[in-house]
Image (cartoon, rainbow, N blue to C red):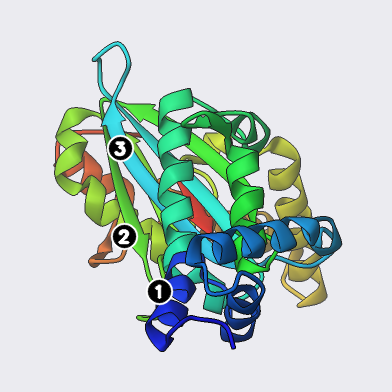
Amino acid sequence: MANYTAADIKALRERSGAGMLDVKKALDEAGGDVDKAMEIIRVKGLKGVAKREGRSASEGLVAAAVVDAPDADGQVGVLVEINAETDFVAKNAVFIDLAEKVLGAAVASGAADAEALASAYIGERSVQDVVDETAATLGEKIVVRRVARLAGEVVSTYLHRTAKDLPPQVGVLVAGSKPAGEVATEVAMHVAAYSPVYLTREEVPTDTVADERRIAEETSRNEGKPEAAISKIVEGRLNGFFKDQVLLEQAYARDPKKTVGKVVTEAGGELTGFVRFRVGA
């Protein structure tokens, strides 16, 4: 019988994130040597990386950081989404530690997309190598899905947990002028809850506006609205679309009588951009 204890099993499970059966098998094969067992878990897991490629990874977490801009003029926010196959792994300490390392690499490297981030470094190894090694340890497909960077005079962030036992599933960055910093965090919370798509109506693609206008016209005629009133009805419905999709035109969560734009203006500032990630969306 292999020379190891229940405490060895517990310690190796915490260190590797692997299941009970895999840990015991590795300890048996290693003759109770914990370090050798850890190596066995990693090697066997790495061999299975290719087999996991086709599997779906739709759980995970969002992590964020805000740092001073490289030129010391303003701030830069970084948001990353990292996916796993199950929420069991998403809340695993090994996975959460990986996310912090990947976020640090994103901040340090200036990577603006997932491909560039995969080639960045954590210590002397690439992010992709570290991700693959962690996937091998945990036995699930792990993907760094996306990364975003947002610069501004001030950048605020908000991370939201959709379940108390899971890491953040929604992450938001909001950038603006310094006076906007007074309300930016609350606006970030609003963005998390109300999911705007655009900052201003000018950002909405012209073909999207045209489609919404066409749908509003067809709907109005199908409802039998008077022809003379259709133009006004269409504009009203189009404005409703903007109020739903455009951040500055949404009713502010904390005071629905005001728009987000009005609240920011009253603070003496302006917003210049935002980013919202929701895991798997």
Is 225 on the left-hand or right-hand side of 108?
A: right
Q: Amino acid at mark 1?
A: Ala
Q: Secondary structure at mark 1?
A: helix
What residue lies at 58% left-to-right and 75% top-to-bottom? 27
What residue lies at 67% left-to-right and 38% top-to-bottom? 205
What residue lies at 42% left-to-right and 75% top-to-bottom? 166
Nearest the eye: 127 or 216: 127
Give the quarter of the image for residue 47: bottom right
Assess disc 2: are there few (<14), some (14-19) or many (≥20) residues with their C-alpha within 10 Å of its C-alpha.
Answer: many
Give percent across and percent down for residue 256.
28, 67
Residue 11: mark: 1
Nearer mark to the viewer, of 1 and 3: 1
- From what the image shows, is residue 236 above or below residue 20? above
Residue 189: mark: 2
What residue would you read off at disc 3?
66
Earlier residue among tags 2 and 1: 1
Is 58 on the left-hand or right-hand side of 167?
A: right
Give percent across and percent down for residue 43.
70, 57
Q: Residue lying farthest top? A: 71
Looking at the image, can residue 139 be seen?
A: yes
